[in-house]
Image (cartoon, helix red, strand yellow):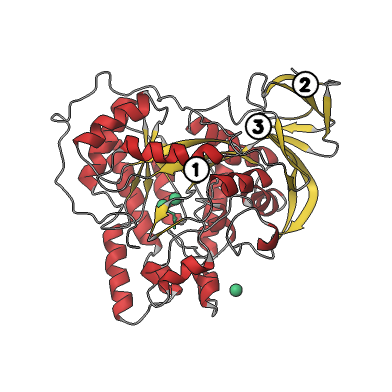
Amino acid sequence: MATKVIKGGTVVTADLTYAADVKIENGTIIEIGPNLSGDETLDATGCYILPGGIDPHTHLEMPFMGTYSADNFDSGTRAALAGGTTMVVDFALPSPNQSLLEALQMWDNKSSMAHCDYSFHMAITWWGEQVFNEMETVVREKGINTFKHFMAYKGALMVQDDEMFASFQRCAELGAMPMVHAENGDVVADLSAKLLAEGNNGPEAHAYSRPTQVEGEATNRAIMIADMAGVPLYVVHTSCEEAHEAIRRARQAGKRVYGEPLIQHLTLDDSEYMNKDWDHAARRVMSPPFRNKQHQDSLWAGLASGSLQVVATDHCAFTTDQKRYGAGDFTKIPNGTGGLEDRMPMLWTYGVNTGRLTMNEFVAVTSTNIAKIMNVYPKKGAVLVGADADLVVWDPEKTKTISASSQQSAIDYNVFEGKTVKGLPRFTLTRGRVALVDGEIKPAQGHGKFVKREPYPAVSKALSTWKELTAPRKVERSGIPASGV
Ligand code: URP
Ligand code: ZN
Ligand code: ZN
Ligand code: ZN
């Protein structure tokens, strides 16, 4: 097998910084040290060699709010590689009453286009004996150990507390980890209806309908429910101090609770919704919405201190035309923003270059912590002999101004448009394959492979039966595509 050597760079991991060459064969790292040689050389002079980024939260080609998110596994994973991300974890989303295994098959089909490796979380969008049974297959046969619960999107994806408690207990006995979209969906629905009735139908009302308290309340509730179920908890898109505080307190009390700020919430604030241009504001409608500077400071502090562990994107991109479904009614604006291509350069620019994060912290929150939490470390998230050669040769001097005109994403705008970043990949390698050279993508559809994720050590020894695990009351839900609150 031909070998590659990344030469002349400085390896940066979550805990070490040192000069070394990295030798790759057959998609894995086979040697790290001085003066290595191989059949092919990649020049890393002046660069850092980092484990490839992992984005633990993407929605590619997802049916949502009357449409499909615009980036699929082709454009989505090209965007990932262009920004130094070499693995994405996407959400398989069953429609209410749909089999989990059937939904997984749909995601499996879509992901055959992937240019980089990927894994899935399974969403629990309804509850019943079939879901209870299929969860075992999902964990033990399909290699998925995380289950997402929406506490918002009432009447569509939202699950009730009793359903969540039952599902969390099932996660505990299977050695899986629940995740939550933590917003109080009942309160959001109520506030949304009132705002609309008062004639507030523009995108700025989306932010008013989801104040930080709805997130803080739901985060606290999910943490307590997880504690009662005896299971760790991963809180997605943590956007405010109230939610961060709940996570911080839980961790101090000895609970395994993880928080995931998004690059969008770290770098864009709620003034974006005050833009007079309807399109500008609508393009930034996502849940939770962007927050003010005080909340942003809280998230940055959490990353530095370790009370928040991960930076993701929740990449769920819609075109301007799709956003316009909500003209005249903000609750119909498809919720979601892009960010896959920009997460690492933006975090480096606003985190490392400003002194808010060290380089090692940057690696931890973009890659290593995620690999550990998702149980794929050290295959992913590591620069170690035997690890997959998912690597980024990071040039700290390289700059660009972010523009939709040059992005991989299929949408017609970029929420970071006009921002100048300093720190970009010179090369991105996916399992040893060079997929990006100085800003130019070398596509290979189908190169990406599904990464199985093993269960965590199970809390319970024996599995319960459906009858033993109290079956919650039946809830009426509309099908997907679903409404916006
Ligand atoms: O607004 C968002 N975040 N859209 C994507 C779906 C979700 O809630 O994560
Ligand atoms: Zn969400
Ligand atoms: Zn604008
Ligand atoms: Zn999401």
Provide the secondary structure element on which disc 3 rests: loop
For the point 67% across and 37% down, which residue is it? 360
**Marks 2 and 3, how far apart at CA:** 15 Å
Cα–Cα span, label 3 and label 1: 27 Å
Give the mark nearest the N terminus, 3 or 1.
1
The amino acid sitting under disc 3 is: Asp
- Vertical position of residue 201 compared to residue 25: above or below: below
Which residue is at the front of the view, 159 or 405? Answer: 405
The residue at which mark 2 appears reads as 3
Q: Mark 3 = which residue?
A: 390
Q: Residue at x 65, y 32 (%)?
A: 390
The percent coordinates of residue 400 (x first, y second) are 76, 57
Give the quadrant of residue 172. top left
Residue marked by disc 1: 307
Report the front residue among 326 and 337: 326
Residue 43 higher or lower than 29, as above or below: below
Residue in front for this viewpoint, 409 or 229 = 409
- Tell me if mark 3 has few (under 14), some (14-19) or many (20+) residues whose alpha carbon lies within 10 angstroms of its own: many
Please report whichever mark, 2 or 3, sits nearer to the chain's N-terminal start. Answer: 2
Residue 396 falls left or right of residue 276: right
Query: Disc 2 vs disc 1: which is toward the camera?
Result: 2
Rendering coords of residue 58 (x, y %): 50, 47
